[in-house]
Amino acid sequence: MVVCYTGGGTLGHVFPALAVHEELALLPDYRCFWIGREEASEREAVARYGIPFFAIRWGKLRRYWSFRNFLDIGNICIAFFQALRILRDQRPDVLFSKGGFVSVPPVLAAAVLRIPVVSHESDATPGLATRINARFSSRICVPFPEGFTSLKRHKLVVTGNPVRRSLVLASRQDALQRPAFLGPTEPLILVLGGSSGSLQINELVRESLDSLTEMGYVYHQCGAKDVQHIVHDHYQEVPFIEEALPLLLKHATVVVSRAGANTLAELALFGCPPLLIPLGGASSRGDQIDNARLFEQKEAATVLYPDTLDVKQFLEGVSSLVTDEKLRGRLRGNLGKLAHETSAQHIATVLKTVKESTCSGV
């Protein structure tokens, strides 16, 4: 079985596909490669799994007027022919699209070459790339049964969002050692702004650091571009969390986070009570707002919406979760209903089924 993975724009489009790769890598005679953009963090993440990486041009699909749209039409056309050549040379049995603007040219090229496509959407509503790719996909894997009425129902498969195996295995362990920096009964306030950090969350944390550290130990992922090298008791700042993430999620009292789909899948898996501050519509298509509202409606998160948020509201939100054990317990219980620890296996099965049905001429 030969699989082409494609997707990018953030690591949120990369890690879920790598989780699916981990499941398919257990098969005999499995081979894969990746078509993505030339971006260091995405290329490095794929390379760590030993997956060959082919870079193509990319153009962003904007839903608003911009002169750059004209330039990117040219980049998208070039990317299509680059993807066409790569797919002809590598001859995959199936293409798995994880979405993002990088995925559209490879999906179109796969359609021309009659290579079956399986797409996955992580968010609570489909993005523009997914809506385009859906036209050429045999199956569209989605995280929830609701929110996808714009897509053809007969193509939809509810799979949840795949999480890497290391996190799935860690979530099942009860005896992960407590972090050395954390006192025996000290609450852990874990702050996650996504793979690139969040300026808004970073500013809220820094402006309220004295008060936050009175509530517990603050472990802050701030993003590589906004490291301030702050020294403060009961506070640690890091650009990005990788190996330590399972340990931190296991012991977090509360997680302050954006509402990216992959982060939410990980929080659900570990049952971490979240205080969500979604990225607003001015900076995105509003997908994080949709994600946060869904979790809020299911009573699986406390949400602070970004447009009117100030330091006082932020501190009140953190304090309510740190001090209210019953609230945290209710959130954990409802998060457990949204966890999909077998999502990667489910998607791997979909890919195998699509490949087999194509080979048999069905």
Image: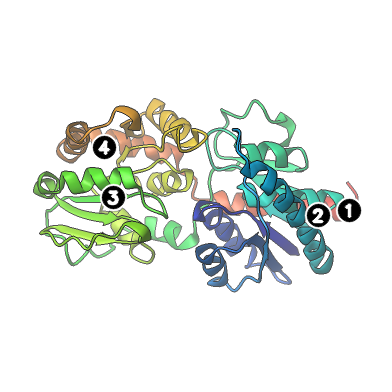
- Image mark for residue 107: none
Identify the mark at residue 360; answer none if there is no mark: 1
Marking on residue 356: 2
- Can residue 352 be seen by looking at this rendering? no
Callout in the foreground (2, 3):
3
The amino acid on which the numbered mark 4 sits, given as a three-letter code, is Gly
* Residue position for label 4: 329
Q: Earlier in the sequence, mark 1 or mark 4?
A: 4
Q: Locate residue 231: give its quadrant.
A: bottom left
* Amino acid at circle 2: Glu
Single out the mark in the foreground, 3 or 4: 3
Number of callouts:
4
Q: Position of residue 219 (x, y in %)?
A: 24, 56
Residue carrying label 3: 191
Most extreme residue toward the right is 361
- For the N terminus, give its image quadrant: bottom right
